[in-house]
Amino acid sequence: MTATTNTDRTQMVPSHDGLHVLPNNPLFTRLLRHAHRNCIALKDRQLGVSKTYGELLDAVLVFREVLREALPSKVQRRLSNGNEVYVGVLAAGGYEFTVAVLAVLALGAAVVPMFPTAPADEVVYYATKSQQVAILSTSATSQLAQDVAHRCGIVQLSILPNLPRTTRLEPHDISLSSNSPQDPREPGVVIFTSGTTGKPKGVVLRRTYTHEGAISVGDSYGVTHTDVLLHTLPVHHQTGLGTSFFPFLNAGACIEFHGKFDAATVLQRWLQGGLTVFSAVPTIYMRLKWFIEQLPEREQIPYKQSAGQFRAFLCGSSALQEHVQDFWTESMGRSILPRYGATEIPGCLRVSVDLHDAPKGSVGQAMPGVELKISPEGELLVKTPNMFAKYLMDPEATKNAHDDDGWYKTGDIARREGNFYFIVGRASVDIIKSGGYKISALDVERACLTLPYVNEAMVVGVEDEEFGQRVGAVLAVKNVNATDVSLADVREILRNQLAGYKLPTVLRVLEGELPKGNTGKVQKKILGPKLVPSPGYEQIPEVQFLCGRLTSPDICRRKVHSGYAILLCSVMSIAANAEHRTWAYLFQLGQQFSPQNILKLILVAEVKCIRADYHHKSSYTTTNMATPTSFTVTKGPITIEALDQGTGPVIVILPSLARGANDYDVVAPILTKAGFRVIRPQPRGIGRSNGPMGKLTLHDFAADVAMVLDHINSGPSVIVGHAWGSQPARMLAVDRPDLVRGVVMAAASAGKLPPGSTEKPFSRLRTEIDGSGDMTLPESKRLEYLQAAFFGPEGNPRLWLDGWNEAAHHAQAHARIYTPVEEYFSAGETIPILDLQAEHDAVVAKDVMKPCLGDRVEVQVIKGAGHAMAPEQPEAMANAIINFVKKI
């Protein structure tokens, strides 16, 4: 065997390069195929040019050689050796940009798109951070590029003057290199993040981003060579590049670059027809909506009809406002497809073009080959083959972006319903911690956007000594003066949609729209502290804030004279739920302190009153014996009925296998009397609850409960799962940790067995359990089974002769069997659990949870109860739940 037996043939022959040779790279392979079809690759409205794929590749090869010759010899050697080389492109989307990007990639370097109107210092930072060897510019950016190149000591090249005026090469003159393929793991593109926390980070994306990753995105939207995309986005960020550029080039489609967005000219282009896809960010869709709505109704018709030419409206960058989606669906006849992703993890979730299978508000399902999971804290974690390679020159940040198991930490709080994911908010800015509650800022924003005069809403946490954070809302309004919108009115209207603790307590109103960064995003981390700074927002005349329940800024700031005691009394009269002695004491203090301090005392006392409202309603509610009412919630084919009883913090009860919510008719009043609101969802197939019953998992049943809790804006609640009901209760804690404060497992099998056990989980008294609800059996046999499986020695099995549902039985049993126990066993990692055991339970293998999960599990035994528990010992069961809730 010779030494060269295992040597690749490319190491034995001369390198295959040349003026007409493209690199061995899947992107260029596809582009050359498209060139042979003689189809249009792009149109540039600004330059007034239209180019085929053949003409585009000809220009790319010409400019590649111009760039190569302009580079110092040491840089050329680095390229030949396969070392990392970065080239900046300072251009808006169009013909010049496309040629420059492809020429850099054809050279074997990585391209760094930059915002063409960024300040010089910012561009210098980008060039320095990425160690650019050259900066490529258009005529519009040449002066800026020259300045940056001079300051950084690098090459500057103008693009258009170096492009061929006539076609030099035909497609058949161009070949692909027979060299080894370009290493797909090497850098292909660098996109700088928005830099809301410190300096922007350079996200290095591998070469696969430009082909395999792009094809994956294109496939999810069904992009083909017949598509014509109207491109209005900046090309220095993910949506403009990874969604609206590379996927369409790979597919052989036509990209029509419109230039800077303007609603009137974009809609005029729509009227001309010939388009199939429109890609934008929420701000653009909102401005198009505004433009159309301000027209007389007759003039709106052509624009609405022109939407019919599009087979897809794509939207990325940030969450789309619900009212904008509703307008598009109802008035334009088309739905907008949301795209979730981040610069670091492009294309990880997808929503199909027909939208038929996607629940409203969902960001879709995992794309093929992508792994997703939700951490115990609710954060979405991702592994995908198209993940970024690194942050430029920042190994510590690269490492910290992942958990110990290599999952990328998105920073987004998410929930899952079946196979679909929903974004609750950003862990850092969209989750507000106020008075012990975790509040989704996005939930509050969605509610604010239902106000008819609100165009945009931004909700942020405002630091507060008493609550930790206040809920601060910044509203951009239309057709009204900012001074006409009051915090009191906003809170009053939103009470119908939001729980009291979610209502804004700080408000600033702007006219027009919210300020945005150069990517079209509202940068909360920057804008929030600027508009409602803490400390200091109290001194800004435009900021309204809750001062007790008095919300007028005049009242909050008024100079109180000798009549301040009258003001004090008026505040006292409002606080009906507070302890009388608290207000009497405050009134006494009012005789001793200055008017300024009185206002502070009012705020402190009222804040304490509100906190009592949050946490201690049971301490002042002595009679709360409301008769249960019911309501239904519908989402697609699913309708869930829930019994609703009482007021106060929410306790949810999920029933046993094949049984309904009425089993707890005796338990619920005890809980409501103690100051709680009891919600009892009926499982599918029982009462007015219905929906698909085949091939369900526990995720589906947990999603049904989540649908109910989202409907009532419950916030974190205690979930009581009786027997089988403990399984969807624990599943809910995993899928929707934002909805779960604690889990009570009442007479519930853990799903696992103690070490050394030879039993099969859920196997005890299987015949008796299944036979109890079998209506074909004689009553005597069913009573025998009921006594054996469900009731203690003193229990009355006749109480459960009725109330069984065969369809629910089959669906729930299937869900238990086909959901791996590891997915729900621990109810997440941090949720407190009460293992409420029945003394005479013949079904459950006891004392499994605490040995497995440790101190977060509390064990309590209900004396005299069997597996049914609720009809046998309702008071003991209810009191155990109440004590557990008070502890947590």
Image (cartoon, rainbow, N blue to C red):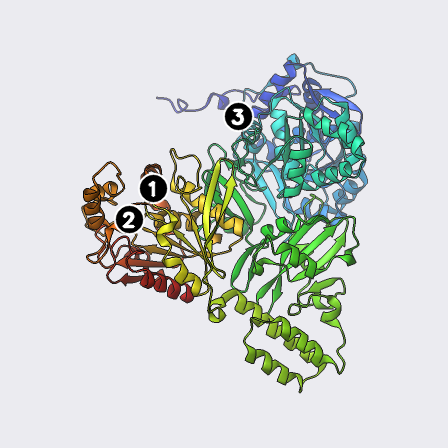
Residue 740: where, in percent of width, then height?
45, 54
Identify the image quadrant of residue 864. bottom left
Query: Residue at (43%, 24%) from the top-left corner?
Result: 7
Q: Amino acid at mark 1?
A: Pro
In the rendered image, which residue does mark 2 sit on? 800
Closer to the camera in the image, 291 or 756: 291
**Earlier residue among tags 2 and 3:** 3
Spatial CA span between label 1 and label 2: 30 Å
- Which tag is nearer the camera, tag 1 or tag 2? 2
> Can residue 764 be seen here?
no
Secondary structure type for disc 3:
loop
Q: Residue at x 64, y 19 (%)?
A: 226
The residue to which callout 1 is attached is 820
Compared to residue 267, the image places residue 572 above or below, namely below
Tag 1 secondary structure: loop
Q: Is residue 325 visible?
A: yes
Mark 3: amino acid = Pro
Q: Spatial distance from mark 2 to mark 3, Cα to Cα? A: 71 Å
- Classed neighbour count for the residue bearing mark 1: other residues with Cα under 10 Å, few (<14), some (14–19), many (≥20): few
143 w.r.t. 591: above or below:
above
